[in-house]
Image (cartoon, rainbow, N blue to C red):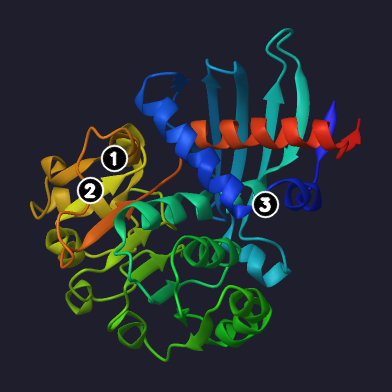
Amino acid sequence: MLVISADDIRRVFTMRDAIESDREAFVLQTEGKAVLSVRTSFSVEGRGLSSFMPGCVSSFPRIGIKIVSTFPGNVGRNLPAVGATVLLLDPETGLVDCIIEGTELTRLRTGAVSGLATELLANDDAETGALFGTGGQAMSQLEAMLTVKKIREVRIYDAARERIAPFIERSSAMAERMGARLVRAPSPDAAVDGADVITTATTTLSPVFDGGRVKEGAHVNGVGTYEPHKRELDETIMRRAGRVFVDNMEAIMAEAGDILIPMKEGKFKREDIAGELGDLILGRAQGRTSKSQITVMKTVGFATLDIVIAHKIFCKAVEMGIGSDL
């Protein structure tokens, strides 16, 4: 059994690799070549949420499961708020043949989801970004944004404002290498005003910015929340968006408060969703139709993304002789 650590993942896989892996995963999912269930989640005595995401991708073939927990209190313990482990099963025997550190894998594949959506939906001349949240997902979200567009400035905002400066300090070298400057946003309004690409990666209960302030032509990625009673995006931005895409319709209809809450209030309809990203990639759904149109992508995650990237990381690690035998 091969054990692949977070450091191993970074040695064998880049953000561009992850974006292309997600592109393939979306196509496989939309074409019906993956079997999975919506994640099963358990609340752990009010401390956090533990979820189990199994699936089978028939084209490899490969079976796997991701176990992911969101425990906000971990921040005070100097631990990731979101931690995960991925198990891959040998398709010949059904036995586990690989254990992958899932926190880094999740950061990478989730960053790549918004990166792919930004590449497909944002205007080509986008140059100003806004990032909400400075937690474990923030670095990969930033890297993905800078990988796909020539962003020159990214405004960083976090409700815990004392976390903004340390994040900028950690991220500035990477951003500078990619031609961008990071700026502390003093308020949500200051972050979104004039921003071409907006990404939210928080665990908030309520919307993090006023959708009425988003400029025409902007693209918005809703990444952080995946529970029916939570949302990062308000009904205003959902109604203003000319094209709304999701990662997986079944999962979104079970988990995405950003969409379920305004639907319950009669302010948004399922028919307002243009399709899954897989539909867009395959040409089954039209993307941006004008430069002034606002576009939104909402993701809650699904197992096909994890299994495809885990399989590709495993193959690269074996090829390069990286990882530890257990």
- The residue at the far top in this view is 92
**Residue 261, above or below 190:** above
Q: Is residue 180 left or right of residue 275?
A: right
Q: Position of residue 18 (x, y in %)?
A: 57, 46
Secondary structure at badge 3 equals helix
Give the class, few, some or many, for how many residues have Cα within 10 Å of label 2's Cα (few <14, many ≥20). Answer: many
Ranked by sequence position, the earlier of labels 3 and 1 is: 3
Q: Give the residue at mark 3.
A: 104
**CB of mark 2 within 8 Å of CB of mark 1?**
yes
Q: Give the residue at mark 2.
A: 287
Give the class, few, some or many, for how many residues have Cα within 10 Å of label 3's Cα (few <14, many ≥20). Answer: many
**Is residue 302 at all visible to an observer of this figure?**
no
- The residue at the far right in this view is 325
Q: Give the residue at mark 1.
A: 280
- For badge 2, the amino acid type reads Gly
User: Mark on residue 319?
Assistant: none
**Residue 291, above or below 183:** above
Q: Position of residue 277 (x, y in %)?
A: 33, 41
**Is residue 215 at all visible to an observer of this figure?**
yes
**Residue 267, above or below 276:** below
Corner quadrant of residue 121: bottom left
